[in-house]
Amino acid sequence: MLLVGVALFASSCGKSTPDDKAVEPSDTPPTAAAKTATADMVAIPVELPTPSFKGTPTNIEVEKLEKPLGHKRPPFLAPAGVTNVASGKPVSSTTEVPIIGELEMITDGDKDAADGSFVELDPFMQSVTIDLEAEYDIYAVLIWHYHMQARVYFDVVVQLADDPDFITNVVTLFNNDIDNSAGLGVGQDMHYVETSEGKLIDAKGQRARYVRLFSNGNHNNDMSHYIEVEVFGKPVK
């Protein structure tokens, strides 16, 4: 298998069920040019943290690794009135008591990479689930695992569902699990390097109440981390 080496610089900074359906892979969010801005389509209100990359630039050799964008991510357009509906919402995890931090920190609005701002889960495959406490039409999910260092997290899978057991109307938004480690199917999305911009995933207006995110350590160690997860959506009318 080919390994892709990407030069990084400081400045660049459940199982599946029969009714499980995948959204078309969307590793790169639509650009502003790809959508026509109208009175009903606006840029989602994202406030990015201060870049905090530390350390010596390194080459990361990970299979199926996307190249850095090389410039600021374009605005992501969604219907007017979209907000971060995950803010302050309850979070549960396969790691009931994190090694570092508290699960509630994943939706507390703090996106900094400093100590005291991130959660460290148990080693190997873990997941976190956010209960939005109501159904929403979801347009984007934005994830910050850890951006103090350039890292690649493995087996990242993002799913939506109507129920906490992820049995009804399960939708897979993103999956870069190349060997089916999570048992959710082989993913077609690319590995990516963490930055202060986070990973933005197009949810295409899917309707759901629960958001679940999987990961299986990173290229430096076996731990999974989360700084913040934002879910941009609108209440169901």
Image (tube, rainbow, N blue to C red):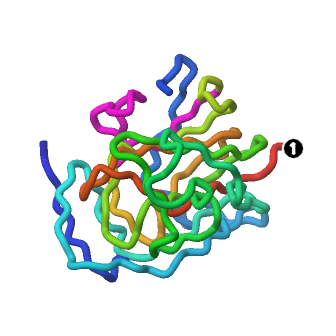
Reply yes or no: does residue 233 show up in magenta: no
Give above or below for 97 relative to 187: below
Other residues around mark 1 within 10 Å, as few (<14) / some (14–19) / many (≥20): few
Tell me the quarter of the image containing the C terminus: top right
Reply yes or no: does residue 172 show up in magenta: yes
The residue at 78%/66% (across/down) is: 39
Q: Find disc 1 in the rendering and name its residue.
A: 237
The image position of residue 69, as x and y in percent, is: 36, 68
Q: Quadrant of residue 189?
A: top left
Is residue 199 shown to the viewer in this render?
no
The image position of residue 219, as x and y in percent, is: 25, 55
Q: Quadrant of residue 175?
A: top left
Furthest toward the top, the residue is 18
**Does residue 127 appear to the left or right of 19 in the view shown?**
left
Q: Which residues are magenta?
A: 169-190
Give above or below for 224 relative to 55: above
Give above or below for 217 relative to 113: above
Looking at the rendered structure, the number of numbered marks drawn on it comes to 1
| Main secondary structure of the magenta stretch | loop
Tell me the quarter of the image containing the N terminus: top left
Q: Secondary structure at mark 1?
A: loop
Furthest toward the right, the residue is 237
Amino acid type at image mark 1 = Lys
